[in-house]
Image (cartoon, rainbow, N blue to C red):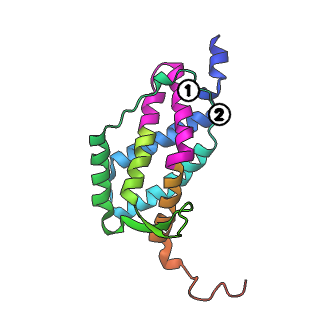
């Protein structure tokens, strides 16, 4: 396979490279969270997470042949450090209640912004580091894995976090109770 054929592979497509850039920026943002005020954190996340979600939804289907290339880089200790930093910054706004679609009793479940954001961080950081390996098969596995995790893991977490962030940032503009929608 010559250089041009390699670069035309889906693993090097603009969709993958754009996702990589957004994932890297998200990781850097989370890693510098201790330097930011809570309102800046919420504002930044409210812009980054929808973009991450859209870019994740657009990832191409890639067949990974050698799954042995899959590696995890974020350790339990690193996850805990990121979680603690986020929880400290988010403070009283960390916990929220939501309704899981697969909950047959329609009961509310307690969620944590810090937990969800750290899980998203772990998936993104593992993806970024695996994709940066100078082995084409590792890049394929990275894209294959992150797309699979989009469906089962971090996509759901982004949706939950965006809802909470929207309320925290713009809840004062909620006029459902004011009757302004009665004319529709």
For image coordinates 55% across by 54% down, the residue present is 50
Note whether residue 144 is visible.
Answer: yes
Query: SS at mark 1?
Result: helix
Segment colored magenta:
126-154
For image coordinates 57% across by 21% down, the residue present is 65
Q: Earlier in the sequence, mark 1 or mark 2?
A: 2
How far is disc 1 from disc 2 in space, using C-alphas?
10 Å
- The residue that mark 1 highlights is 140
In the depicted structure, whether residue 156 falls above or below residue 12: below
13 relative to 23 in the view: left or right: right
Q: Residues within 10 Å of mark 2 (few under 14, many from 20)?
A: few
In the depicted structure, whether residue 65 falls above or below residue 156: above
In the depicted structure, whether residue 15 falls above or below residue 86: above
Quadrant placement of the N terminus? top right
Relative image position of residue 29 (x, y in whole percent)? 39, 48
Relative image position of residue 170 (x, y in whole percent)? 49, 72
Quadrant in the picture for residue 112: bottom left
Relative image position of residue 32 (x, y in whole percent)? 33, 48
- The residue that mark 2 highlights is 61
Q: How many marks?
A: 2
């Amino acid at each position: 396979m010559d250089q041009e054929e390699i670069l035309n592979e889906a693993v090097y497509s603009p969709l993958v490279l754009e996702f990589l850039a957004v994932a890297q920026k998200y990781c850097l943002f989370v890693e510098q969270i201790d330097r930011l005020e809570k309102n800046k954190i919420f504002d930044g996340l409210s812009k980054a997470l929808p973009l991450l979600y859209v870019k994740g939804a657009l990832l191409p289907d890639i067949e990974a042949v050698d799954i042995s290339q899959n590696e995890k880089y974020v350790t339990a200790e690193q996850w805990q450090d990121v979680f603690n930093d986020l929880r400290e910054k988010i403070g009283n706004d960390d916990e929220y209640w939501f309704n899981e679609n697969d909950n047959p009793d329609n009961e509310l479940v307690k969620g944590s912004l810090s937990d969800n954001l750290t899980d998203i961080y772990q998936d993104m950081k593992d993806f970024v580091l695996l994709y940066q390996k100078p082995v084409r098969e590792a890049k394929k596995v990275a894209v294959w894995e992150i797309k699979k995790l989009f469906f089962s893991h971090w996509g759901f977490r982004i949706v939950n976090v965006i809802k909470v962030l929207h309320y925290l940032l713009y809840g004062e503009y909620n006029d459902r109770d004011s009757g302004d929608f009665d004319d529709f």
